[in-house]
Image: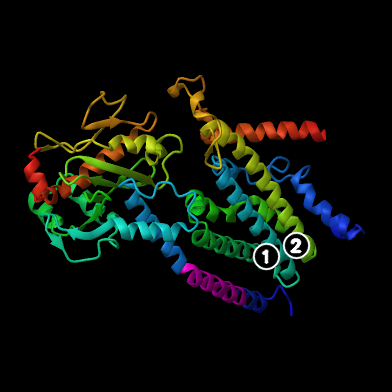
């Protein structure tokens, strides 16, 4: 057959596409469950890291099984809350914080009336994870999500049961500049959040990321990353925007009322 | 390259395999595939995974295209080559996501971008279309490894001087650092892409004076 003929070219292209499509769909289907498992375990690991668990994994032979085991042991409850802080039906673990962030961003957009804000807040389903430590104190973990310089940044913040003091935090990012913005994913940055407070004399202040360094002993601020100004600002915005929506939930907790901050 | 005309087979295989590692290196001599060499050489681990992934793709795409070379319609030659390369790249990406999740996260889009790596199309056009499948496989693997070696050398220097670590393990003693009262500080430039250009440039210099090109 003439290799330059139209018929040959069309038949060749068709056959090639069929073979390639089969090979690709077989690979994708075959590996799908394993890939999803990896994503799920990564989320569990991040949740655990925010309460200072699952840190040293180098000596663990089966990481996935180990993380699953820790998650079962420490995370005793996971649930969704609405904008008034009441519990809501739904799967908290499967809830993607990005969808909530999209709503939160609309709420904070310029020119949104109070009525619209109310309607938007009605759509919120915010995940809460509860960790019971070995000394049986409870820690509450909330996810946060926002924008850095090049793309999404996200993380988990764990709070003591006064819903004011930060117990731990962890951040990750899609593609911040290595050595600059990407430093938010390293302990040197996120360990600073331990012991910081979200409320100052009863007022929600969130945590400031201070360029040039927070004063020593500042309970509401941490040091920004030098050279990572926009990412640092992104973290500050992310904490403020996301935690603001959790405020009603914090306010309803007994220990929060007792401590009166 | 008229490889098939040389007589001794083992000698030829060896020559095809080793030439791209040294005097015909795709990065330092042919200056192909520079783009990803800048992007994935901040850490040794990602450079290793990337080198391996590219080796697999160059090897098998050369093998497949060479096996098909008698049947490919000349009018869609480049498209057929691209389809073969793209398929292999997607398979590698999927496998990494399933079995080397952390590495695939670090490499992110650069695995997908292997498709645009000039070395692969370069070897297919220059070698696989004119030579037998076996020879093409060896040539592809050789060139992939030649790329990988440079990546690893560059990443070695960038990770060591930029982060003070190798494969994630601290090499430069913590006590040397200024923050801990020492005299040393990591070189921030090494983490940024220009450092890769500088290191590749130095390697090219060393290599050219060695081979007297």
Label pair 2/1, CB-CB below 8 angstroms: yes
Q: Chain of mark 1?
A: B
Q: B180 above or below B134?
A: above
Q: Mark 2 to mark 1: distance in Å?
A: 10 Å
Identified at 55% across, 75% down, the residue is: A22
Left or right: B166, with A194 as reference point: right
State the residue position of label 2. Answer: B129
Residue B195 inside the magenta-drawn segment:
no
Nearer to us: label 2 or label 1? 2
Left or right: A46, with A87 as reference point: right
Between B101 and A71, the one nearer to me in the picture: A71
Query: Residue B174, position in %: x, y?
Result: 49, 29
Furthest-right residue in view?
Answer: B7
Left or right: B127, with A110 as reference point: right
* Quarter of image, res A23: bottom right
Q: Residues within 10 Å of mark 2 (few under 14, many from 20)?
A: many
Q: Chain of mark 2?
A: B
Residue A23 inside the magenta-drawn segment:
yes
Identified at 51% across, 51% down, the residue is: B103
* Quarter of image, res B43: top right
Task: For residue A49, say whether it is visible.
Answer: yes
Query: Residue B190, position in %: x, y?
Result: 54, 32
State the residue position of label 1. Answer: B77
Query: Residue A78, position in %: x, y?
Result: 24, 60
Q: Residues within 10 Å of mark 1 (few under 14, many from 20)?
A: some
Identified at 77% across, 43% down, the residue is: B22
Q: Which secondary structure, mark 2?
A: loop
Look at the image and give the residue range highlighted in magenta: A14-32
* Quarter of image, res A18: bottom right
């Amino acid at each position: 057959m003439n290799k330059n003929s139209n018929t040959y070219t069309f038949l060749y292209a068709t056959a090639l596409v069929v073979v390639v499509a089969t090979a690709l769909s077989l690979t994708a289907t075959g590996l799908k469950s394993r890939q999803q498992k990896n994503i799920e375990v990564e989320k569990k690991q991040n949740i655990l890291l925010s309460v200072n668990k699952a840190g040293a994994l180098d000596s663990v032979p089966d990481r996935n099984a180990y993380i699953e085991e820790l998650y079962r042991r420490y995370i005793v409850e996971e649930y969704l809350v609405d904008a008034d802080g009441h519990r809501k039906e739904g799967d908290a673990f499967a809830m993607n914080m990005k969808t909530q962030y999209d709503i939160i961003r609309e709420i904070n957009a310029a020119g949104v009336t109070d009525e619209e804000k109310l309607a938007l807040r009605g759509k919120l389903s915010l995940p809460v994870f509860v960790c019971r430590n070995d000394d049986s104190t409870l820690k509450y973990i909330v996810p946060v999500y926002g924008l850095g310089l090049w793309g999404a940044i996200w993380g988990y913040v764990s709070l003591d049961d006064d819903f004011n003091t930060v117990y731990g935090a962890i951040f990750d990012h899609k593609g911040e500049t290595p050595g600059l913005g990407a430093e938010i994913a390293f302990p040197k940055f996120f360990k600073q959040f331990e012991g910081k407070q979200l409320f100052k004399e009863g007022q929600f202040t969130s945590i400031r990321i201070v360029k040039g360094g927070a004063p020593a002993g500042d309970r509401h601020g941490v040091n920004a990353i030098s050279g990572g100004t926009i990412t640092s600002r992104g973290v500050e915005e992310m904490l403020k925007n996301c935690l603001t929506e959790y405020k009603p939930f914090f306010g309803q907790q007994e220990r929060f009322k007792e401590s009166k901050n | 390259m008229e490889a098939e005309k040389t007589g001794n087979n083992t000698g030829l295989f060896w020559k095809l395999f080793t030439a791209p590692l040294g005097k015909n290196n795709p990065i330092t001599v042919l200056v192909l595939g520079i783009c990803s060499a800048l992007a994935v050489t901040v850490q040794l681990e990602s450079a290793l995974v990337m080198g391996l992934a590219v080796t697999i793709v160059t090897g098998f795409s050369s093998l497949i295209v060479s096996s098909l070379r008698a049947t490919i319609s000349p009018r869609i030659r480049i498209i057929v080559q691209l389809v073969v390369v793209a398929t292999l790249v997607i398979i590698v990406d999927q496998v990494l996501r399933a079995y080397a999740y952390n590495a695939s996260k670090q490499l992110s889009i650069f695995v997908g971008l292997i498709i645009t790596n000039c070395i692969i199309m370069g070897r297919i056009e220059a070698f696989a279309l004119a030579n037998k499948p076996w020879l093409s496989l060896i040539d592809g693997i050789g060139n992939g490894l030649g790329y990988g070696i440079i990546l690893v050398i560059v990443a070695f220097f960038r990770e060591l001087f930029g982060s003070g670590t190798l494969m994630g393990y601290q090499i430069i003693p913590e006590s040397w650092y200024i923050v801990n009262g020492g005299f040393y500080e990591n070189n921030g430039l090494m983490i940024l892409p220009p450092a890769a250009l500088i290191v590749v440039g130095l390697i090219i210099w060393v290599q050219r004076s060695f081979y007297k090109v």
